[in-house]
Amino acid sequence: MTFNAAQIALLINGKIEGDAEASVDSFSKIEEAKEGQLAFLANPKYEDYLYTTKASVIIVNDALVLKGKVNGTLIRVPDSYSAFAALLTRYQQMMAEQLTGIQQPAHIASTAKIGKQVYIGAFAYIGEEVVIGDHVKIYPNTYIGDRVSIGDHSVIYPSVNIYHHCKVGKRVTIHAGSVIGSDGFGFAPQADGSFTKVPQIGNVVIEDLVEIGANTTIDRATIGSTIIKSGAKLDNLIQVAHNVEVGRNTVIAAQAGVSGSTKIGNHVMVGGQAGIVGHIAIADGVRINAQSGVSKSIKQPKAAVTGTPAYDYTSTLRSQALSRKLPEFERRIHELESLVRQLLAERV
């Protein structure tokens, strides 16, 4: 597809500086862009490339003050990074809209309800009483279990498995290999040392505008629902255990794990490889640093924690700074002890 600067500016509410008819047919990083491509500048570290890039159209911030001549057409917006993201989203939607129909072979139960302009890829399995909304994309080799519902405009990428009775909202994206609704890790210890499985009869509820990365697993609840609330973003390779709640617009980075029945608030940020124990609560706006181990509830909103066990971020940094000085402190203590012994000897 080819677009000119005027069309792009209209999509992102930008102001044009240069040739409004300059056209582009692809995207590129500003340092590698060629003629006929669209780039953007958000990080000041890359500003020098603005004056050398061959990109035909560049999205920049309103506040940018030019230091030289720019060969391409500029589109000024309040936030170039957000505008570029919105443009990519719109482009992706336009491309996806061209993908419709049911490929064969695919199994679709006779009781399933399929919406308008849906795409179902080859070797997909759609179970009994499944409800699929309008404009949903289900890619090949995907399993949708009985009585699952998927809201309008959601995208389910290849080899995703959504177990029975789970609910997926509107405009949800689930990337390849993810498993939604597998059994929670529930086993009752017995007197003889063995374990008896506790049936997991709940489900998973994923609200609107959630994105789930590749190979992430979200366990179904023992009773009730494991809930991922609207706007939450989960990275690749995350484990969310049974009966967990992840709040609105919370983001969790790769390889993090959340144990059962923990409640994570809204707008929380969880770094990669962080671990959170079960049956605790995390307040709204909390930031958990990468590789932190959270072993108790964090009740203060917007707190920042790090370490294992996780502790106040600022205090931990101070402790780390002091720990690097321990050899010096040891030397000074030995000197003071020697001085004390000398003073005591002089008094005798």
Image (cartoon, rainbow, N blue to C red):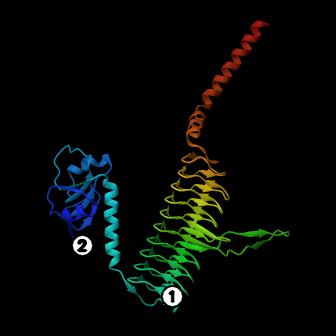
Q: Earlier in the sequence, mark 1 or mark 2?
A: 2
Q: What residue is disc 2 on? A: 1
The x, y position of residue 45, in whole percent, is: 32, 46
User: What label sits on residue 141 in the rendered view?
Assistant: none
What is the total number of numbered labels drawn onto the structure image? 2
Residue 227: percent from left, percent from top: 58, 67
Residue 254 rendering spot, x and y as whole percentages = 52, 60
Q: Does residue 293 lie above or below 107 as drawn?
A: above
Q: Is residue 169 left or right of residue 315?
A: left
Q: Nearer the viewer, residue 269 or 346?
A: 269
The structure residue drawn at horizontal position 49% and vertical position 89%, both measured from the top left corner, is 108
**x and y percentages locating residue 77 in the rendered image:** 27, 54
The residue sitting at 59% across, 79% down in the picture is: 165
At mark 1, the secondary structure is loop
Above or below for 342 versus 206: above
Q: Quadrant of the C terminus?
A: top right
Residue at 15% x, 61% y is 20
Which disc is residue 112 wearing?
Answer: 1
